Structure formats: C-alpha cells, structure tokens
Amino acid sequence: MIINLLTDNPQSWIIPYVKQAAEELRSLGHTVYFVHNQKDIVAGDCAFFLGCEKLVKSETLKKNKHNLVIHESALPAGKGWSPLTWQILDGKNDIPVSLFEAEAAVDNGPIYFQDTLHFAGYELNKELKEAQGRLSIELVKRFVLAYPAITGQRQAGAATFYSRRTPKDSELDVNKTIAEQFNLFRVVDNENYPAFFNHLGHKYIIKIYKFE
C-alpha cells in the first residue's frame, strides 16, 4: 500500500509516535510518506491525519482512497477541538477514541474502530499524551492490517461540539482549592500553556510535576 501520514505542526507532541508508526508500517512492506504539509500528500491508498491543526482541503481528500482521522470522543458527540482535554476537565477518566473517515464536514465520516483510553485520575499532561499517542499508533496499524476487508459505520445520535482552547483556559481560580482544580492541573502544558492565576494586579505562573 501507499500510505501518507500527515502532522501539519512539525513541533507537535505526536511527532515521535507518528515516526514510530511510519517505521512499523515500512517494516510490513508498505510505502510510507510522513509529511507536514497537506500539499505534499501523494496519491495512494490511505492518508492518516494525525494531530492536525488545519482543516484538510477537499482536493487533498481526493488523492487517496481513504482519509483517516483519530478523534478522542464517541462521535458524533464531542466533535471539535481538544476532546480529550475537555473530557478530563469534565471529570471523565474513560475516554473513547474513534478512527473514522474524513469528509468535507468536520468529524462527520463513518467510524471504522472505537477504543477507550482508561486513566486513574492522577495522570498529568505528559502521561495523557503518551497514552493517546500509543493508542493512535495501534489504531493506524489496526486499520492497515484489516484493509481492505473493513467497513465503517455511519455516525448516529446527537452531535455536540467542543470549542478551541486558548491559553486563557489555563487560568486558575484563586478562590478554589487545588483539589477542586486538579483536573485543570492535569491538562496544562508547563511550557506552552501553563497554569496561571491573577492576584493583586499581577499574573503568576504555576508549573506542575509529579514527584517520582
């Protein structure tokens, strides 16, 4: 098979996992292109869009027989941005993950596989991403190994949407306890969007690490 792997942010946390997926797929005899711009996708059998931050153009979708996306929700519930983060903030520790066909409408195509990430409630951002990355690789390989004897199921049920997160969403409430805001501590990134609070006219940044 000719397989494209696209991650449009060369600095994305998922890059090491996508590189691993590329190596494992090549070891199975497939031709794999790992690119960072959708214009570099070549005509082939499958294109996987992993950790992409930009919408894929319709002309890009025409280049491959299948265009696959992995999304951390039980679609059609939880479409949109940062679904894993929003669910952790809602107090959930069992996070569904869907591998589905990309279509012109966002997060709307048939679903091929669904799995679940299980957390205990103490994992911080790095651990959440590690689990997300490992399962993403597993779902990519699962699709490739099953292809072409694979069919998708159309999404059914009411659609809900998550909004895009901004650095402002990492703000702590000085009037709440650490325990009350621990899930926010779990999802912040110490370098890119750290936890912070405003007090007496000043902004303070807090970084969190787990003591091993």
Image (spheres, rainbow, N blue to C red):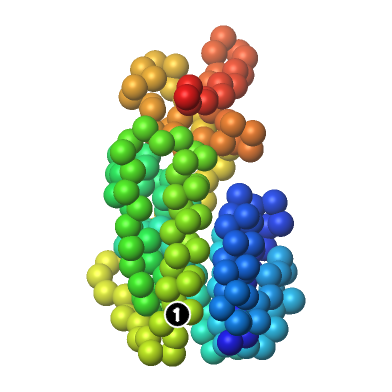
Side (left or right) of 185 relative to 96 = right
Say if 163 sits above or below 89 in the image.
Answer: below
Going 52% across and 40% down the picture, which residue do you hit? 126
Count numbered badges in the picture.
1
Disc 1: which residue: 145
Say if 18 sits above or below 4 in the image.
Answer: above
**As drawn, which residue projects farthest toward the left?**
157
Q: Is residue 54 visible?
A: no
Quadrant where the N terminus sits is bottom right
Element at label 1: helix
Q: Position of residue 121 (x, y in %)?
A: 33, 36
Q: Position of residue 132 (x, y in %)?
A: 46, 53
Please tell me in which quadrant of the rendered image residue 25 appears.
bottom right
Please tell me in which quadrant of the rendered image residue 54 appears.
bottom right
Q: Position of residue 9 (x, y in %)?
A: 68, 57
Going 45% across and 30% down the picture, which residue do you hit? 185
Going 38% across and 66% down the picture, which residue do you hit? 98
Which one is in front, 176 or 143?
A: 143
Q: Is residue 123 visible?
A: yes
Crowd band around label 1 with a 10 angstrom C-alpha radius: few (<14), some (14–19), many (20+): few
Going 44% across and 17% down the picture, which residue do you hit? 174
Residue type (three-letter) at the residue carrying disc 1: Leu
